[in-house]
Image (tube, rainbow, N blue to C red):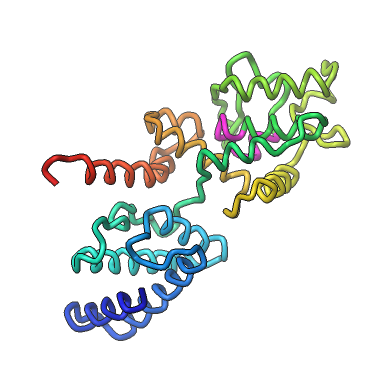
């Protein structure tokens, strides 16, 4: 792989005429990317796909790299893979399918379906805490709520089919819930919450002291279950929101519907979730179109 990088650097220097400082910056960026690939057991450029590039960008974000630096690294990767495609070294240029992000916006980590399933199976539902945690995880994945919205839910925010959510700017929205999430909430309430008519007990999710659960409690809980599930990604409560939106889009949901469910004021905020679906669409086109 290093030979490919050397050839690329020669190409952008001699044929493209890029400045030496730019060449050195791209060299540094590609060295980081290749080190990441080696750490994940990928030894050749032909084995790299879109998910690997996304994971690399997410790792940089988690490590606190400046957005401008990550943006430059993405450009270096896109140029490198365009060169590899031009030289016939790779058959499919997966970097081509990545939408260049705005400087403030980078692609988030998204869990696979199997990772979500493993995470949801971690709580011990024979205990009150485990039953509560199961309900929290089911609701986060079924609704795409922000963690602050989840913590602010009251018992009477839930009906037989949906949640009434107060989002940013005190805007109210109705989010439908699937059967698994509703059953998890019912199980938690019926088994461990008892009579909850009083004002004091109106919070839906409470901690061991009976007080409304807070953001840090949810964050810690998801981290612990992620480790138990063997998930290597750096996950947060917001990861469930990203996964919710991406999986809906992958399965054909309309972007406007997802925007409404997430409570985004602008469709541009929702559009970031098209990155994986767009790459899969392009892959299918490349494989299936009879004239290619």
On the image, which quarter does residue 193 sit in? Answer: top right
Range of residues picked out in magenta:
140-151
- 50, above or below 200, in the image: below
- 221, above or below 177, in the image: below
Query: Is residue 212 rendered magenta in the image?
Result: no
Give the side of residue 8 with respect to residue 212, left or right. left
Query: Along the line of sight, which residue is nearer the eye, 145 or 32?
Result: 32
- In percent of width and height, residue 92 lies at 26, 55
Give the side of residue 124 with respect to residue 285, left or right. right
On the image, which quarter does residue 122 sit in? Answer: top right
- 192, above or below 151, in the image: above
Query: Along the line of sight, which residue is nearer the eye, 113 or 74?
Result: 113
Of all residues, the one furthest to the bottom in this rendering is 20
Q: Residue at 82% across / 31% down in the picture?
A: 127
- In percent of width and height, residue 200 lies at 85, 25
**Dominant SS type (magenta):** helix
């Amino acid at each position: 792989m290093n030979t490919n990088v050397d050839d690329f650097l020669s190409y952008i220097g001699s044929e493209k005429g890029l400045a030496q400082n730019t060449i050195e910056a791209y060299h540094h960026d590609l060295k980081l990317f290749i080190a990441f690939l080696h750490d994940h057991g990928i030894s050749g450029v032909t084995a790299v796909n879109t998910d690997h590039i996304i994971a690399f960008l997410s790792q940089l974000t988690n490590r606190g790299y400046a957005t401008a630096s990550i943006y430059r690294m993405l450009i270096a990767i896109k140029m490198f893979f365009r060169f590899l495609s031009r030289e016939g070294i790779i058959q499919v240029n997966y970097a081509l399918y990545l939408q260049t992000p705005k400087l403030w916006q980078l692609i988030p980590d998204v869990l696979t379906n199997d990772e979500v399933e493993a995470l949801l199976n971690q709580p011990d539902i024979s205990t009150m805490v485990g039953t509560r945690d199961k309900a929290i995880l089911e609701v986060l994945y079924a609704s795409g709520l922000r963690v602050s919205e989840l913590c602010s839910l009251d018992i009477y925010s839930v009906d037989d089919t949906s949640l009434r959510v107060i989002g940013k700017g005190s805007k109210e929205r109705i989010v439908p819930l699937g059967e698994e999430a509703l059953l998890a909430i019912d199980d938690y309430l019926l088994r461990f919450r008892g009579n909850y008519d009083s004002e004091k007990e109106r919070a839906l999710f409470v901690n061991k002291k009976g007080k409304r659960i807070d953001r840090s409690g949810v964050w810690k809980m998801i981290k612990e279950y992620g480790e138990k599930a063997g998930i290597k990604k750096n996950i947060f409560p917001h990861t469930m929101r990203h996964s919710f939106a991406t999986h809906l889009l992958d399965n054909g949901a309309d972007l406007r519907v997802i925007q409404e469910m997430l409570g985004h004021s602008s469709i541009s905020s929702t559009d970031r979730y098209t990155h994986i679906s767009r790459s899969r669409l392009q892959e299918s086109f490349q494989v299936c179109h009879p004239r290619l």
